[in-house]
Amino acid sequence: MSKKYKIAVVGGDGTGPEVVAEGIKVLNAVAEKSDFSLQYTHFHIGGEHYKATGEILTDKVKASLREHDSIFLGAIGHPDVKPGILEKGLLLNLRFDFDQYINLRPVKLYEGVETPLRNKKPEDIDFVVVRENTEGLYSGAGGTLKYGTPDEVAVQESINTRKGVERCVRYAFEYCRKRNKRKKLTLCGKTNVLTFAFDLWERTFHEVSKEYPDIEIDYAHVDAICMWMVKNPEWFDVIVTDNMFGDIITDLGAMIQGGMGIAAGGNINPHGVSMFEPIGGSAPKYTGKQVINPLAAIMAGQLMLETLGEQKAAERVETAVQKVLREDIKDVAAGKMGYTTSEVGDLVAEFIGKTS
Ligand code: IPM
Ligand code: MN
């Protein structure tokens, strides 16, 4: 019996559904050539649904999402919904509730893609950020006092647990070993100022590193990491960091790999239901225009296959994307590809169909 994966699809808002459709097109093309099949359930949640019903994510929907092997997400964010509502109610809610404690973000410059870094080539930009995804400043701990008065106090605390830090660090070591490239793991922190939180991170990092003598370890403060990512990105292989720093450095990462058009991420629970997404957002003004680059969503699908353990299929998708970037599309930016969103999906899917 061949394997069957149940995929929950959340197209979401704006251009999300358009790019997700291309992701599915490519996933189907690769499944055709593999010994597994994919079965999709579409969930109509996001900004439009919230506006119509006042519901963001009900327990019933959550229970149903839980019955899937993975979630494939387009984008969440609506111009008429106050910032924070959908992010907290849907995206962060799922990350926390499904304990997707890793946010995995590859930063890879492909041939044919322009980086804003002068003199840097694909061999110089190829690393992965392992971001802790359920703790830190994102935990929601804190509060306000005397709200709206001149004496207002706002406290936002960074929660770091030994368990949460250790499982993240361990995942990063394992990932670095499996990736088998430079075998170097860099901890990104701020031990000179955040002396409680990053003391825990640093001690845990060093303790866990003893189990991985084959991995070289390295440390840099987050501000220095930003500098090196621009000046010497070739120094990095895998970077592990907390939730907030990971959020910031991965946007920088997306830029040096050529932009949001190709940047994908995975919210991973290695023992549960993970969620994969292009990281570019819903781009509402482009909705329905077929100008957004679907390669980020396609690469999110690639990351999903890799996480499901379908390595060979994941490689086929990456090879096809590489070919399309190198030979077909003019530019990765929205509206500049020389093809519509759907045509780019066709190019990738057709290449997969043609190759054995
Ligand atoms: C990301 C996004 C989210 C985050 C937002 C939308 C809540 O920026 O996935 O990086 O801050 O984690
Ligand atoms: Mn972000």
Image: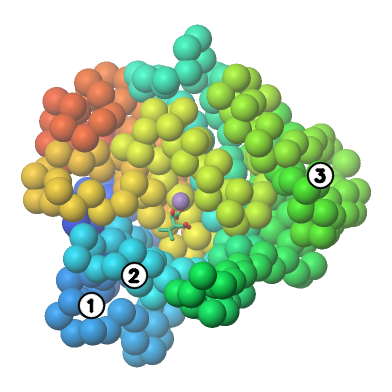
Disc 3 secondary structure class: loop
The quarter of the picture where the C terminus appears is: top left
Distance between mark 3 and mark 1 Cα atoms: 43 Å
The amino acid at mark 3 is Asn
Q: Is residue 155 left or right of residue 304?
A: right
Which quadrant holds residue 115? Answer: top left
Residue lying at 70% horizontally and 43% vertically, measured from the top left:
188
Q: Are marks 3 and 1 in contact (CB under 8 Å)?
A: no
Residue linked to disc 2: 86
28 shown above or below 231: below
Q: Position of residue 319 (x, y in %)?
A: 39, 32
Residue at image mark 1: 50
Q: In this view, does 296 lie to the left or right of 349?
A: right
Q: Is mark 3 within 8 Å of ligand 2?
A: no
Q: For the point 48% across and 74% down, which residue is it?
A: 149
Badge 2 amino acid: Leu
* 237 left or right, relative to 170: left
Residue at 37% over, 33% down: 259
Q: Can residue 27 be seen in this view?
A: no
Q: Do the residues labelled 1 and 2 touch (CB within 8 Å)?
A: yes
The residue that disc 3 covers is 192
